[in-house]
Image (spheres, rainbow, N blue to C red):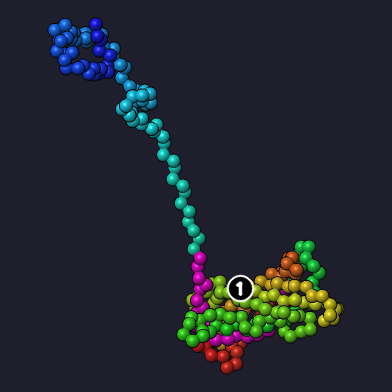
Amino acid sequence: MLRATGAILIVAIPIGFARAASAQIEIVPAPQADVPMRPAPQPTAPPPAGQGASMLTLPERTAPSPAPPSVTMPLQLAAPELPKEFRGCWQGIVEELDSIQREPGGHKLGYWTAKTYRLCYKRVGTGPYELTFGETGTVPSEKIKYSKGRVDVISTDGTTQARMRAFLHFDEYPVGTNAGASTFSVDEVTMLDCRIVKDAMHVDAQVSGRREDAPWFRARWHTTLARAEGASSD
C-alpha cells in the first residue's frame, strides 16, 4: 500500500501500458492519520538544511547606544577695535622701574635697559585701523642688538581706556663685556594698561622677563606717551 510522505511523487507511465493496467491498478488514498506532523518552526531557529523556503530570523533587540556628548568648539574672537581716541602715533621712553624682583632660581639681575615705545594706531589706504609697534625696542646701546617687538589689543572700554600686551625680544651682552663677547637672549611680555587724557597716553605696566627661555624677573613701571610730532589721527 502506498503512503503519503509529504512529497508528491510523479510517475510517468506509457499510455498503452496505462490502459492495459487501468483495470488492475487501484488507487487507494493514504489514510490521513498516517501523515507525519511536522513541528512548527521556531521564529529564531535557522531553516532546516535543504528546505527550499527561506525563514526570516529577527535580530535580538538591544538597548540603543547613548548619543555622544555634544562638543562646543571655542570661538576664536578677533582683537577688539580701539576707540578713535587712540588714533595716531604715541611714543616715549621707559628709563626707570617702579619695582623689580628676581624669579626663584633666576639668573642674577643686571642693569635695567631703557625701553622705547612707539605705538601707532593707523590705517593704510581704505583698510581697517591697525595697531603697530613701530620703532620698538631698546634705547640705542652697545649692550643690545637684534631688538624687535609687537603689541596686541586685549580689551577696551570703548572710550579712552585699553589693555594691551607687548612682546619684546633682544640679545644682550653680559655686564662688563665688550661687543666681541657672546650675547644672551631676553624675552619680555608686558601688560599695558593705557588711558588717554587729552594728548597723552598714561601707561601702567607689568613685565615678565625670561633669559635664555628661563624665568628671570618680574617688574613694574609707568610712563606717559606723547603724541608723535606730525602724526596724523587718520
Image quadrant of residue 21? top left
Residue at x 78% of width, y 65% of height: 106
Residue at x 23% of width, y 17% of height: 11
**Picture coordinates of residue 51, whole percent (x, y):** 33, 24
Image quadrant of residue 97? bottom right
Location of residue 209 with respect to 135 vertically, above or below: above
Image quadrant of residue 162? bottom right
Location of residue 193 with respect to 17 vertically, above or below: below
Whether residue 101 can be seen here = no
Whether residue 180 can be seen here = yes
**Picture coordinates of residue 78, whole percent (x, y):** 50, 71
Residue at x 71% of width, y 81% of height: 138
- Horizontal side, residue 8 vs residue 146: left or right: left
Q: Nearer the viewer, residue 204 or 11?
A: 11
Residue at x 44% of width, y 42% of height: 66
Give neighbour class at mark 1: few <14, some 14-19, many 20+ (Cα, 10 Å). Answer: some
- Horizontal side, residue 161 vs residue 97: left or right: left
Magenta part of the chain:
76-99
Quadrant containing the N terminus is top left
Residue indicated by mark 1: 165
